Amino acid sequence: MRIIMRQRLLSILDHYEIFDEAGQLLFKVSGKVAIAPELRIQNAEGEELGYTKFEMFHLLPHYNFFAGGEKIDRMAKKVTLFRARYELEESGWTVQGNFMDHEYQVTDAEGREIANISKAYLKVRDTYAIDVPDERNVLRVLMTALIVDSVQHPEH
């Protein structure tokens, strides 16, 4: 499944719309200003599906993922010798690639691809193509892409 994540124009906070390849709205994402910033994900009908929440008091960024009122994962930024990497603790996923060029992959503990995320250039607003072979992973992959974009490119 391919989803398209677009940042809304003229938005002070992080706001995104997520579409399928046919252009049908699937999700809406709204940033929430708080001591611990949040990104709230809703379906096209406005029902909340989940959210991410910044975890304070760490040297490197940590975020918790919630769905259905339950914590489903925790993502932490790790620094290696040459580039950043993110790890999702509960799922065992790793996010790595070229973050400056907005090209990165999500893999499981055995190295199998969970998702491929890439930025579409020559667009008025930030737009990402996210390929997720298993539709059951879409929400967690979307949360991952949102956090990576917000941490790696805070100027957006």
Image: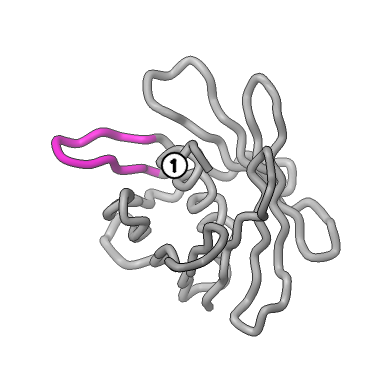
Relative side of 104 to 50, left or right: left
Q: Compared with residue 128, is residue 36 higher up or lower down, i.e. above or below?
A: above
User: Residue 107 appears at what percent x and percent y?
Assistant: 34, 59
User: Residue 5 appears at what percent x and percent y?
Assistant: 58, 63
Q: Is residue 81 magenta?
A: yes
Q: Compared with residue 9, is residue 31 higher up or lower down, i.e. above or below?
A: above
Looking at the rendering, the stretch of residues picked out in magenta corresponds to 77-87
Can residue 107 be seen here? The reply is no
Residue 58 found in image quarter: top left
Can residue 93 be seen here? The reply is yes
The outermost residue toward the bottom is: 22
Q: Compared with residue 20, is residue 142 higher up or lower down, i.e. above or below?
A: above
Residue 120 found in image quarter: bottom left
Q: Which amino acid does label 1 sit on?
A: His
Describe the element under mark 1 as helix, strand or loop: loop
The overriding secondary structure of the stretch rendered in magenta is strand
Name the residue that disc number 1 marks: 153
Q: Which residue is drawn at 38% across and 19% down?
A: 59
The outermost residue toward the left is: 81
Q: Residue at x 58, y 45 (%)?
A: 72
Relative side of 101 to 46, left or right: left
Q: Residue at x 56, y 36 (%)?
A: 64
Is 90 in front, or is 82? Answer: 82
Q: Does the magenta stretch include residue 84?
A: yes
Relative side of 63 to 99, left or right: right
Q: Residue at x 69, y 45 (%)?
A: 11
